[in-house]
Image (tube, rainbow, N blue to C red):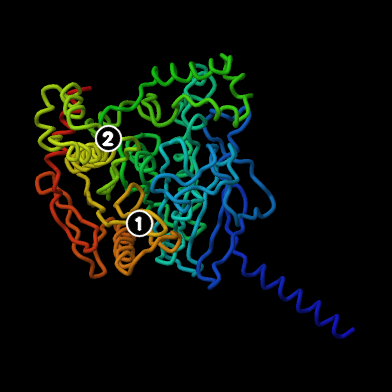
């Protein structure tokens, strides 16, 4: 009997101890419970709802608040990733750079929080991470987006989900009539804004400072950051921005009329014409017939005008900016054109500007033309965009820090290829190399420690410098001083600034 009593007592004490160690936080919709890291120093909350599931009649509507709950909601696992095709490793991107293969669902509007378990009266700076994926894929559950390393540096790390593809950027002609004044098809961006509003109202309960919020993203996430800085709907929700490889400065965004036309044609693929009919189509069926519906467009609400015009008119949300791009992220899946074809194409496309551009992107031989096509792909999609943002932000009075990531990253698990590929910088910047199964060296780990420290400093103070790091100069339009991340981290001058300026001029005149 005594043995049974002692066993029951021990079990009760274990249960009480477990409950005592379970972190609980209050949100405006109800309490949530998370978990502690094995050393008990970091609290982790995964899958906190910030909006109602955008399914059924809520498909293609602005995000609305979730239904409040009474009991403590257990938030210890990632939610489903946004609806998209099941991912598989491709090109240079292994599984660590992709969402889990399941679950994937329309019910995806959740966020995750990593924060220190130490009680501190001083509120901590907050980072909100926005993933890339071409606005057609991606999710916050990718291993390289883990927030523990930054939480250990007294930063509250938040990662969010948003709708992608047809579910995030559909612009059917009936949407304007029943979307509460937000007749936008930019639902993915509205999701991001809703998550930022959640952060503003709730992050103090997780130890965060709602007045010191940095938004950060890469690729489409960086384009999203650029859009959030531009849109009046996000005013007052953040004060700093980190934009890695992506922006919207060449008037390339689709207009609202074009977006509606594409969306209406998509509906006809299913033999449907009304929004009500389209909402009844299973999500899996919508994915089977893709029509290239993805990405930001000028809807006159989220974006009252083109991003470039918003900045030219100085109507953007003022932020301190850290931005840059990678050396080898020119994405080209097919065979490059030969020298003659490349040169001729440049002349046809850029007319009077072609000769000057060919000085920077030459095609005197097939080999040279192949290299120029990669560089042109990099600069057109990424380099020129972030370069243009840097210049106009400085002109508008913002402080800007620019980088170039040149470190050769192992592309394969066996290390057969190396390049500074697109997304390659992310696990370095957030000190998450441990989640990537590649043959990293001591130099890689040293760079991750250095690069992440710059990011941490910037998130905390708006200045990446400190901690005996090499000095990172402010960017100026004249000096074009940047930080170069390579085997050796050092400052230097942007070496291809003239090429980027010529490309920007040629593209602008060609629109």
Asked which secondary structure carries label 1, the reply is: loop
The percent position of residue 331, horizontal first and vertical second, equals: 32, 40
Residue 486 position, x and y percent, is 24, 59
Would you call the spot at circle 2 few (<14 residues within 10 Å), some (14-19), or many (20 or more)?
Answer: some
**Mark closer to the chain start, 2 or 1:** 2
Vertical comparison of 462 with 434: above or below: above
Along the line of sight, which residue is nearer the eye, 232 or 184? 184
Q: Quadrant of the C terminus?
A: top left
Front in this rendered view, residue 114 or 165: 165
Q: What count of labels does the image hold?
A: 2
Residue carrying label 1: 416
- Tell me if residue 455 comes above or below residue 188 in the rendering: below
Residue located beneath label 2 in the image: 336
The residue sitting at 80% across, 79% down in the picture is: 7
Q: Is residue 238 left or right of residue 175?
A: left
Tell me if mark 1 has few (under 14), some (14-19) or many (20+) residues whose alpha carbon lies within 10 angstroms of its own: few
In the rendered structure, the answer to whether residue 98 lies left or right of residue 57 reads left
Q: Where is 169 relative to 153, above or below?
A: above
Task: Give the image location of residue 434, x and y in percent.
Answer: 43, 64
Q: Is residue 354 visible?
A: yes
The reply to whether residue 321 is in sight is no
Write down the quadrant of residue 358 in the picture.
top left
Could you tell me which secondary element the residue under label 2 belongs to? Answer: loop
> Residue at left 33%, top 27%?
253
Which quadrant is home to the N terminus?
A: bottom right
In this rendering, position of residue 120 left or right of residue 405: right
Task: Name the residue: 53% across, 35% down.
Answer: 63
Q: CA distance from mark 2 to mark 1?
A: 22 Å
Question: Residue shown at 35%/59% (left/top)?
Answer: 428
């Amino acid at each position: 009997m005594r043995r049974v009593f002692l066993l029951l007592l021990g079990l009760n004490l274990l249960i009480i101890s477990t409950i005592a160690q379970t972190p609980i936080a209050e949100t405006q919709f109800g309490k949530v419970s998370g978990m502690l890291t094995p050393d008990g120093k970091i609290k982790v909350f995964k899958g906190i709802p910030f909006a109602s599931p955008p399914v059924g009649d809520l498909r293609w509507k602005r995000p609305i608040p979730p239904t409040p709950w009474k009991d403590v909601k257990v938030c210890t696992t990632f939610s489903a990733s946004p609806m998209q095709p099941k991912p598989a490793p491709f090109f240079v991107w292994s599984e660590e750079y992709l969402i889990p293969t399941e679950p994937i669902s329309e019910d995806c509007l959740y966020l995750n929080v990593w924060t220190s378990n130490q009680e501190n009266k001083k509120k901590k700076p907050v980072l909100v991470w926005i993933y890339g994926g071409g606005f057609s894929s991606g999710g916050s559950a990718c291993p390289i987006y883990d927030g523990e390393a930054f939480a250990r540096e007294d930063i509250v790390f938040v990662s969010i989900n948003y709708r992608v593809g047809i579910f995030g950027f559909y612009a059917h002609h009936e949407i304007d009539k029943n979307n509460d004044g937000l007749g936008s098809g930019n639902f993915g961006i509205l999701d991001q804004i809703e998550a930022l509003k959640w952060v503003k109202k709730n992050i103090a309960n997780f130890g965060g400072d709602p007045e010191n919020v940095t938004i950060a993203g890469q690729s489409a996430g960086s384009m999203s950051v650029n859009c959030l800085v531009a849109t009046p709907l996000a005013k007052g929700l953040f004060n700093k921005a980190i934009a890695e490889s992506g922006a919207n400065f060449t008037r390339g965004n689709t207009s609202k009329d074009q977006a509606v036309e594409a969306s209406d044609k998509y509906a006809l693929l299913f033999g449907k014409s009304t929004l009500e009919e389209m909402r009844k189509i299973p999500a899996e069926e919508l994915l089977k017939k893709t029509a290239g519906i993805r990405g930001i467009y000028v809807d006159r609400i989220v974006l009252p005008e083109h991003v470039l015009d918003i900045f030219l008119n100085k109507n953007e949300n003022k932020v301190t900016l850290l931005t840059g791009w990678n050396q080898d992220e020119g994405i080209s899946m097919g065979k490059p054109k030969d020298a003659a074809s490349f040169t001729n194409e440049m002349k046809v496309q850029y007319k009077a500007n072609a000769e000057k551009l060919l000085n920077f992107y030459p095609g005197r031989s097939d080999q040279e033309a192949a290299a120029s096509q990669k560089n042109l792909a990099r600069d057109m999609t990424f380099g020129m965009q972030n370069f243009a943002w840097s210049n106009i932000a400085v002109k508008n009075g913002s402080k800007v820090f620019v980088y170039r990531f040149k470190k050769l990253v192992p592309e394969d698990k066996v290390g057969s290829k190396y390049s500074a590929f697109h997304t390659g910088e992310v696990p370095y910047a957030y000190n998450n190399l441990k989640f990537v199964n590649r043959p990293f060296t001591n130099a890689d780990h040293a760079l991750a420690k250095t690069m992440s420290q710059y990011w941490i400093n910037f998130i905390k103070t708006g200045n990446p410098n400190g901690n005996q790091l090499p000095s990172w100069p402010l960017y100026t339009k004249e000096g074009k001083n940047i930080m170069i991340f390579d085997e050796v981290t050092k400052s230097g001058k942007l070496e291809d600034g003239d090429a980027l300026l010529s490309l920007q001029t040629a593209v602008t005149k060609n629109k």
